[in-house]
């Protein structure tokens, strides 16, 4: 039995389709990522899986239980961290922990081992009001509260949104640690680079799942030769590449621009001549590269539109 | 006062009680530059921006924005700058057209001018078909692109962008940056914060704040070289890991 099994799930709000025929299986002890921009449908899916929202049609089971019929039982077995901070800001750190523990009929002491790696970083602030914590600490407290009843499944809705690169990295390390204790975890994120932290990912956009695979394989599904091109002015380079007769896609990626060609194989030396001789760009560098998950995501998004 | 500089800060400091949220930062931004203002959560970025846009008085130090002093000419600064953030940009319960008209009016544009600008903007963003739709019903990416254009309605000298692309899909995020490039090419100075480290590479220069201080400031290539890092993310992580204001 898979901890999450979803078949042909649909959800609309008024005329707006939030989830369109979504099917996905999450395996035991997987760290599974739902990657997609705001408005893709991630939160709707998570709210259905956590029994907070009913689907219009389709089936979904969580830990072998139906999300509509067995909602009460499901709620005792999963830990949920919503996208918005949902703890009591006017209770202290410790009071929040005790409250969530008592709601689930347990105590902090009873499950201390599980939460210790995270909660220990908060213990010096036990008496501080949750509302007075920094963003990163609120996030750690929310995760501790979601874990207090030893859930079999952890559902994290955009835990790293608006969080800086260092705290994001630390957060994923905490999730790896929890996974090693046997918990199944699903997390959503708009940050493509976090995909590589997951065992498998579903790329989601506009209510549709574009692809489900390992992060390595998702990147490999990009099926065109990809060039990374650099020049002294990125903006000039983008404009010149866009007007090149063989240009297919032209997307800035950090200090480089990623380029695909309309032909099977791009002619690198001709392209270089075009950029230097014809366009007068300086410091031009062109190299073949392996695509990453963001290349793949954009490629799939564009295919979906056309 | 150097006329060529869009922003000039010297030992700019803001304390809350004993706590120096911004601790003697000094930097200059040239006209037409895209300046990336990076830092960990809690490093003091927002406090610094609030001082620069005339919303918060500094405790000590000096700063001028668009040639005006932040202590004595805050109102003049507000007329010369544009501002957008991820958290607040447009009124969600007003339509696209109403938002443009509202901001045009706030910035003192004439009725004719607002009309002309609105048409130009709706056509360049391909938003004509949704001009009478409420902002709240639009996809985030459209909203953010529109918010940027609205922040540029009054042709400000400098535009401040506070995490403008958070949560936006990868294609729209890149289109947004092309808007930024275009604005900079037309002479607008762009002051931008982001958590996407690849976007730091799109800036002419980047500063990295740690614990209220600017710990590094250079071109992206200069920073990569100085820290012998593959990308700005590595530089950022190296610097921010040493932060005391641990999250």
Image: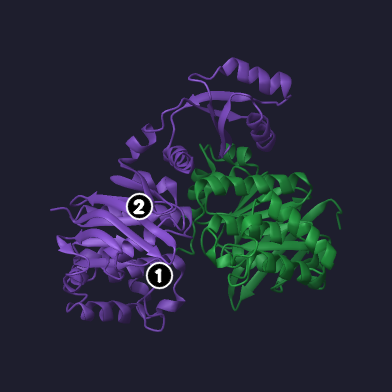
Chain colours: A purple, B green
- Spatial separation of the CA atoms under disc 2 and disc 1: 22 Å
Q: Secondary structure at mark 1?
A: helix
Which quarter shows the C terminus of chain B? bottom left
Give the quarter of the figure containing the N terminus of chain B.
Answer: bottom right
Is residue A120 in view from this perspective? no
Q: Is residue B9 visible?
A: yes
Give the image quarter of residue A75.
bottom left
Residue A256 place in picture, x, y as percent: 57, 34
- Residue A173 left/right relative to A135: left
Counting other residues with Cα less than 10 Å from the Cα at mark 2, is it few (<14), some (14-19), or many (20 or more)? many
Extreme residue in the left direction: A1
Q: Position of residue B15 (x, y in %)?
A: 63, 73
| SS of the residue under disc 2 | strand
- Of mark 2 and mark 1, the one earlier in the sequence is 2
Horizontally, is A179 left or right of A270 in the view? left
To which quarter of the image does residue B162 belong? Answer: bottom right
Camera-nearest residue between B55 and B149: B149
Location of mark 1 (residue): A138
Judge depth for marks 2 and 1 and give the one in front: 2
Chain letter of disc 1? A
Q: Position of residue B6 (x, y in %)?
A: 79, 55
* Picture residue at 21% right of the left edge, 81% below the top: A102
Choose between A1 and B16: the one closer to the eye: A1
Chain under numbered label 2:
A
Q: Report x, y in % for residue A146.
A: 28, 69
**B116 up-or-down from A95: above or below:** above
Count of numbered tags: 2
Residue under label 2, please give it. Answer: A34
B140 sits to left or right of A51:
right
Label 1 Cα crowd, 10 Å radius (few <14 / some 14-19 / many 20+): many
């Amino acid at each position: 039995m898979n901890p999450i099994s979803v078949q042909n799930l649909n959800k609309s709000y008024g005329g707006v389709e939030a989830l369109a025929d979504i099917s996905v299986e999450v395996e035991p002890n997987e760290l599974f990522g739902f990657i997609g921009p705001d408005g893709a449908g991630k939160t709707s899916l998570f709210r259905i899986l956590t029994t907070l929202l009913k689907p219009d049609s389709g089936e979904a089971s969580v830990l072998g239980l139906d999300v509509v019929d067995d909602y009460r039982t499901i709620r005792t077995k999963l830990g949920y961290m919503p996208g918005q901070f949902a703890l009591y800001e006017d209770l202290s750190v410790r009071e929040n922990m005790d409250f969530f523990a008592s709601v689930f009929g347990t105590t902090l002491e009873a499950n201390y081992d599980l939460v210790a790696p995270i909660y220990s970083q908060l213990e010096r602030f036990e008496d501080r009001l949750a509302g007075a914590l920094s963003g990163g600490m609120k996030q750690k407290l929310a995760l501790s509260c979601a874990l207090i009843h030893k859930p079999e499944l952890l559902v994290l809705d955009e835990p790293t949104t608006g969080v800086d690169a260092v705290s994001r990295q630390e957060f994923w390390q905490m999730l790896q640690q929890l996974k090693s204790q046997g918990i199944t975890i699903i997390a959503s994120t708009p940050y493509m680079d976090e995909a590589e932290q997951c065992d498998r990912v579903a790329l989601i956009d506009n209510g549709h799942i574009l692809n489900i695979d390992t992060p390595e394989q998702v990147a490999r599904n990009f099926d065109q030769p990809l060039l990374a091109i650099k020049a002294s002015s990125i903006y000039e380079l983008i404009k010149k590449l866009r007007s090149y007769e063989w240009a297919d896609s032209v997307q800035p990626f950090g200090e480089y621009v990623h380029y695909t060609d309309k032909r099977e194989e791009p002619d690198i030396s001709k392209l270089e001549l075009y950029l230097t001789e014809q366009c007068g760009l300086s410091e031009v560098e062109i190299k073949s590269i392996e695509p990453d998950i963001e290349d793949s995501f954009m490629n799939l998004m564009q295919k979906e539109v056309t | 006062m150097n006329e060529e500089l869009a922003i000039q800060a010297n030992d700019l400091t803001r304390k809350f009680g004993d706590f120096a949220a911004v601790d003697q930062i000094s930097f200059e931004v040239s006209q037409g530059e895209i300046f990336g203002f990076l830092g960990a959560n809690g490093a003091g970025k927002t406090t610094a921006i609030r001082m620069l846009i005339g919303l918060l008085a500094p405790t000590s130090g000096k700063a001028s924005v668009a040639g005006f002093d932040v202590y004595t000419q805050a109102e003049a600064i507000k007329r010369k700058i544009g501002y957008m953030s991820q958290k607040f940009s447009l009124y969600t319960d007003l339509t696209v057209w109403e938002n443009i008209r509202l901001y045009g009016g706030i910035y003192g544009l004439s009725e004719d001018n607002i009309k002309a600008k609105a048409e130009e903007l709706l056509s360049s963003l391909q938003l004509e078909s949704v001009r009478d739709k409420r902002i709240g019903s639009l996809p985030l990416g459209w909203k953010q692109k529109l918010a940027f254009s609205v922040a540029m309605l009054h042709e400000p000298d400098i535009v401040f962008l506070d995490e403008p692309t958070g949560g936006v899909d990868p294609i729209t995020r890149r289109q947004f940056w092309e808007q930024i490039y275009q604005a900079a090419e037309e002479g607008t100075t762009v002051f931008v914060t982001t958590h996407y480290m690849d976007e730091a590479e799109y800036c002419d220069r980047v500063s990295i704040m740690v614990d209220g201080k600017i710990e590094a400031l250079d071109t992206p290539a200069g920073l990569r070289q100085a820290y012998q890092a593959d990308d700005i993310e590595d530089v950022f992580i190296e610097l921010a890991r040493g932060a005391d204001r641990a999250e």
